[in-house]
Amino acid sequence: MLRDFCRFAGVTRFETLFPRMPEGWARHFDRYEWTGAIDLASNHIRVSDRFSHPPLEAFEPERLTVPSIVIPYQGLIVNGWADPVAAAVFVDALNAHALDLWAGGNARIALVINPHDPNGSAETLKAHRGDPRVGAMTIPLTTAMLGQGLWDPVYRVAEEANWPVIIHFSGVEGAYLGAPPLAGASHTNALSRHILMPHLAESNLASLVFEGTFYRFPRLQVVLAGFGFKWLPSLLRRMDQEWRNFRSDMPWVKDKPSAMVMRNVWVTTYPAGEATRPDTWEGEFSDELSRRLVFSSNAPFDSDDEQAVEAALGRGWLDRIASNSLELSGIVAAGR
């Protein structure tokens, strides 16, 4: 069975989180500035009802038939918030909501950390080590690259708990000042931002490799989810080449960058529709590299399933991805 490692579940209103916050903070988030944010974000570019969508169905973990990691996706948006204290309260309430309502059966939660306070987040994560409802952690991207020592406290907890660290963009990157920029600056149109999202994965992967993260945490497993995957071989070729040319500048990097990626990094299939015609690109994937590709659905939003992956990539890739996902599933299970 194909293992789904990137399911998403919806909180459509902030009000559902209010019982999980102190009363003062519940009043803070009860302002229209927050409760209307979802509607405003979805409507400000809408020019006709052709783009309207029906409400998402309530997520029911018992309906999952395979082991899955559920990301409380809404928590990733705090990477664009200017108020780090509000971000901490919101993320804590969202994680509590997810643990109570979205965990169970085959579903385990990826705890969202507050990216404005990695040290405080590490202490929160420690309280959940051994919690069978938790299977991973996820970091909202900021302007601090993931290889910087700033993140070491949360990586230490993830390694000790055998939790993969899942990285997925929130969608505000490149859209707001203070959020991570794309390709050097803020782009003025949505199409450019969508096209350039893989740059976030490439930049942060280079940071993880060249700033020595996988030496400080050799068992750490990082999953780059939702960025596609065809970009990976060309990035690894360039990383290996520049490492050979300039390795004297960073003597702490003792292994080929691609070798570290093969040990510590995974990429996901979504969106599989961007990878049709495998005959044009699969030759760039060695057998070893192809074993780092695992399934993600992006459900309940615009999503893939087994049939979509098979239609885009073919049965051979589907079987390979299923086997890879089982291997990563073993890492998650080892954290129980």
Image (cartoon, rainbow, N blue to C red):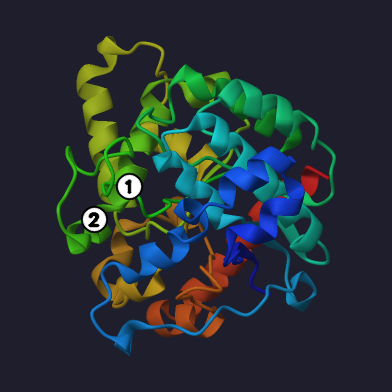
Q: Residue at x 40, y 35 (%)?
A: 142
Circles 1, 2 touching at the beta carbon (< 8 Å): yes
Circle 1: residue type: Glu
Specify the quadrant of the image occupied by residue 329: bottom right
Q: Residue at x 36, y 57 (%)?
A: 285
Q: Residue at x 46, y 63 (%)?
A: 38
Q: Is residue 128 above or below residue 48?
A: above
Specify the quadrant of the image occupied by residue 50: bottom left
Residue 310 percent coordinates (x, y): 47, 82
User: Mark on residue 173?
Assistant: 1
| Closer to the camera in the image, 35 or 326 | 35
Q: Residue furthest bottom?
A: 50
Q: Earlier in the sequence, mark 1 or mark 2?
A: 1
Mark 2 secondary-structure assignment: helix
Residue 210 percent coordinates (x, y): 36, 24
Q: Is residue 206 above or below residue 294?
A: above
Mark 1 secondary-structure assignment: loop
Residue 23 percent coordinates (x, y): 73, 42
Circle 2: residue type: Arg
Q: Is residue 171 left or right of residue 153?
A: left
Q: Is residue 260 left or right of residue 161?
A: left
Residue 317 percent coordinates (x, y): 47, 72
- Image quadrant holding the C terminus, namely top right
Q: Is residue 154 left or right of residue 32?
A: right
Tag 2 residue:
193
**Residue 90 makes an appearance in the image:** yes
